[in-house]
Image (cartoon, rainbow, N blue to C red):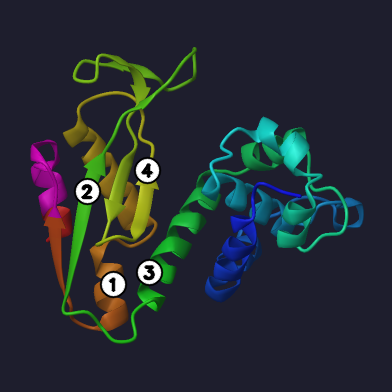
Amino acid sequence: MTSDGGLLLLRQADRQLGLSKALAAGLPDPRDPDRIVHPALTLVRQRLYGLCLGYEDLNDQDHLRRDLAWQTAAEREEPLASSPTLCRWENGADRQAAWQVQELLVEQFIGSFTQAPVELVLDFDSTDDRVHGQQEGRFFHGYYGDYCFLPLYVFCGEPLLVSYLPPAIGTMRGTLGRFSSCWSGGCGGPGRGRRSWCGPTAGFAGGGCCGGAKLRAWVM
């Protein structure tokens, strides 16, 4: 018996998209191949499916790892990775690994079209992620009235293209400026879609906090 029956539907969607396989193949794995117990693909599926089903805390995996439904979804016949194993794996990711994940999201988005779109509208938005403790990078935000992170999201319609957690300093305009510099050197920005499709118009949507001249010049 399991309370996560939707997990198998999630696995089927993942099989169709090939997302977990692409992630596992693209992320570096410095572990000794002769001593690996939990392959990268299993770790990716375990963490990805957990996030999709609302199990954000790695501690949840200490009992989920023994659930037969989870083992079936990960295509394993033994207990999955423990929370310490998943924690070490996540903490081993560097900035380059993060950009590889973002690039994959962009490639998945481009591959979802059967023909080139006429227009691409990038929607920039940020939201507060309140923290409860002394987490590194937290800061007090006057508008939200609490200590938080302020991740920036970039959507194109419904699909999420980029999620970016900037340094907790300065204004949102400064954050967007740093983001534009980083994304131009990593995922390629709006030009990535234009180069892939040879010509669609790229538009930009954002609130007043997104009105910095540097970002507007980058989008143009």
In the picture, the disc for residue 124 is: 2
Residue beneath disc 3: 109
Q: CA distance from mark 4 to mark 2?
A: 11 Å
Could you tell me if the residues under marks 2 and 1 are in contact, i.e. CB atoms within 8 Å?
no
Residue 180 visible in the displayed image: yes
Q: Secondary structure at mark 3?
A: helix
Comes first in the chain, label 3 or label 2: 3
Q: Which residue is mark 4?
A: 164
Residue segment shown in magenta: 205-216
The residue carrying pointer 3 sits among few (fewer than 14), some (14 to 19) or many (20 or more) residues within 10 Å by Cα, namely: some
Instruction: Give the amino acid type for the residue marked by disc 3 in the picture.
Output: Phe
- Secondary structure of residue under mark 1: helix
Q: Which residue is mark 1?
A: 193
Looking at the image, is mark 1 or mark 3 nearer the viewer? Answer: 3
Taking the image as shown, residue 16 lies to the left or right of residue 131, namely right
Q: Position of residue 122 (x, y in %)?
A: 21, 58
Q: Are circles 4 and 2 on residues that touch, CB within 8 Å? A: no
Q: Earlier in the sequence, mark 4 or mark 1?
A: 4
